[in-house]
Image (tube, helix red, strand yellow):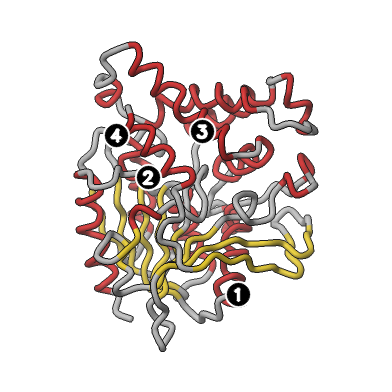
Amino acid sequence: MRRLMLGLLLLLVAAPARAQQEGVYTLPHFTFENGAAMTDMKVGYVTYGTLNAAKSNAVLLVPGTSSGRHWADDYVGPGKMYDTDKYYFVGVDPIGGGTSSQPKDGLGPDFPHYTIRDIVRAEHDLVTGGLGLSGLLAVAGPSMGSFQGVEWGVTYPGFAKGLILIVPAARSDNHFRSMVDAMVAMITLDPAYQGGKYTTNPTEGMRRAGTLYFPWLYSDAYLQTLTTDAQYQQALWAFGTAWSKVWDTNAILLRYLASRNHDASIPYGGDMRAALGRVTAKALMLVSMTDRTIPGYLSRELYAGLKDATWVEIPTIRGHLGGAAPLKDSGEYVFMADRIRPFLDSLGQ
């Protein structure tokens, strides 16, 4: 159970132990996909390693739905999964959380409902305008990070040489939407939520929403390892409790709605093959076949639409979290690192 809690906290707010530089880039003006606009929008980030003279070894690390710029801290360092002896890594806070602009800055429930495409356009502005890069070696991330990776490939073909897509898909489906809808209902039914105009963060709804998400994060085989009621209760409440410690309620609602509503094919008339046909990057897909958050057919749809993709199945019973948050030094971590390091090497610099 201690390892479980460690994994969840890593997924949410891994400690910035190896961060070399924290930064915030401000976009003077940003227009969202829904037409809303914001001035002086902040995009937070952290860097690791050294950018080479040619500026050709940069890898963007993009987080899952409830994570932020430090999601990969335990995986970044000399000789690690994301090897700072060779590459320069940039961890980013998507719109709506961390050190990026978010509801608690003042707009509360009126903060724009952003999309994954909005997130990626803001990241592109950070990478080009803030960091002065004309390209990336790769974009890497799990879950919603894979949504972002795919959108990088679709919206900016050729900008990144590679995409590392972990527990991946190019869209959400009714399966995931129903999970998010249940969580939203639980959070907004909390009397302390007050229509989003609260003055004190209403954490009880978040804690209870986590119990709805919990069984979808793991496989049946993993749930059977919780052999005592104490183990079960601790696991049941772990995810929502971790949310309540680090997230503003309006912020987590908007973040999960962005994932809920994502579909890379929307700008292409619903034609997923047309959308994915724009991707020129080489892709490494690391798939958990025990994943109940992103069903396997969505990963297969993505694989079928990419021109140059390698499909790898992670041996895990930890379901979605087996790929999204492999425990430090676990078999899953070693397996993934042994495939990610050579993939990055194969892209050149």
Q: Are marks 3 and 4 in contact (CB under 8 Å)?
A: no
Disc 4 residue type (three-letter): Arg
Residue labelled with disc 3: 174
Q: Quadrant of residue 101?
A: bottom right
Residue labelled with disc 2: 324
Answer above or below: position of 54 versus 199.
below
Residue labelled with disc 1: 130
Q: Nearer the viewer, mark 3 or mark 4?
A: 4
Q: Nearer the viewer, mark 3 or mark 2?
A: 2
Q: Are marks 1 and 2 in contact (CB under 8 Å)?
A: no
Q: CA distance from mark 1 to mark 2?
A: 28 Å
Mark positioned earlier in the residue sequence (3 or 4): 3
Answer above or below: position of 100 versus 175.
below
Q: CA distance from mark 3 to mark 4?
A: 22 Å
Disc 3 residue type (three-letter): Asn
Across and down, in percent, residue 293 comes to: 41, 35
Q: CA distance from mark 1 to mark 3?
A: 37 Å
Q: CA distance from mark 3 to mark 2?
A: 21 Å
Name the residue located 57 percent from the left edge and 32 percent from the top edge. 244
Q: Which residue occupies the foreground of this view, 182 or 321?
A: 321
Mark positioned earlier in the residue sequence (4 or 1): 1
Disc 2 residue type (three-letter): Ala
Name the residue located 38 percent from the left edge and 33 percent from the top edge. 5
Q: Are marks 4 and 1 in contact (CB under 8 Å)?
A: no
